[in-house]
Image (tube, helix red, strand yellow):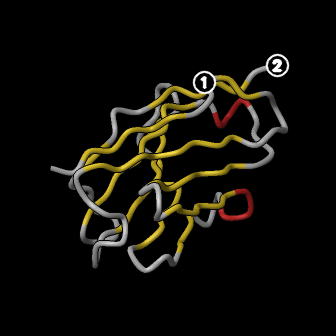
């Protein structure tokens, strides 16, 4: 059973870079055909897909966030990381990491972590 766990600071100041890590257990992030995604849910709104890093290491980002987003991985630690730069209070959300064998589908989810952007 694949398990995902998000970690990172719960409070980020405006204009800074938000950095979150997803630690994966029970499976490898290099397993063929798996896609490892970041998704967020702002308060009172629906889920918003941010981007993914594929089993191959290739990345793809939401066009609306692409200029501020970077997703990378550390295969030795079986982790992948989200960096979102120049944050504003509108980036306040619960952030989830998730994975699935088809891009855009999710078989496994982390529990989510609240990130608040505030001075």
Q: Vertically, is 57 above or below 78?
A: below
Tag 1's secondary structure?
loop
Q: CA distance from mark 2 to mark 1?
A: 13 Å
Residue 96 image position (x, y, % from top left)? 42, 41
Q: Which mark is residue 10?
A: 1
Query: Foreground mark, 2 or 1?
Result: 1
Residue that numbered label 2 is attached to: 119
Q: Residue at x 43, y 80 (%)?
A: 56
Q: Quarter of the image containing the C terminus?
A: top right
Mark with earlier residue (2, 1): 1
Q: Position of residue 42 (x, y in %)?
A: 52, 33
Task: State which quadrant residue 107 falls in.
Answer: bottom left
| Identity of the residue drawn at 47% across and 30% down | 113
Q: Secondary structure at mark 2?
A: loop
| Residue 3 locus on image (x, y percent) | 26, 45
Which of these two is toward me, 42 or 18? 18
Residue pictured at 65% horizontal, 37% vertical: 91
């Amino acid at each position: 059973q694949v398990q995902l766990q998000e970690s990172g600071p719960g409070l980020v100041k405006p204009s800074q870079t938000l950095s979150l890590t997803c630690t994966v257990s029970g499976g490898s992030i290099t397993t063929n055909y798996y896609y490892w995604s970041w998704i967020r849910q702002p308060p009172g709104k629906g889920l918003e897909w941010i981007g993914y890093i594929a089993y191959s290491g290739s990345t793809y980002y939401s066009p609306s966030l692409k200029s501020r987003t970077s997703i990378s991985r550390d295969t030795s630690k079986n982790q992948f990381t989200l960096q979102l730069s120049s944050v504003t209070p509108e980036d306040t959300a619960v952030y989830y990491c998730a994975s699935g064998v088809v891009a855009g589908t999710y078989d496994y989810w982390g529990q989510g972590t609240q990130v608040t952007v505030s001075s």
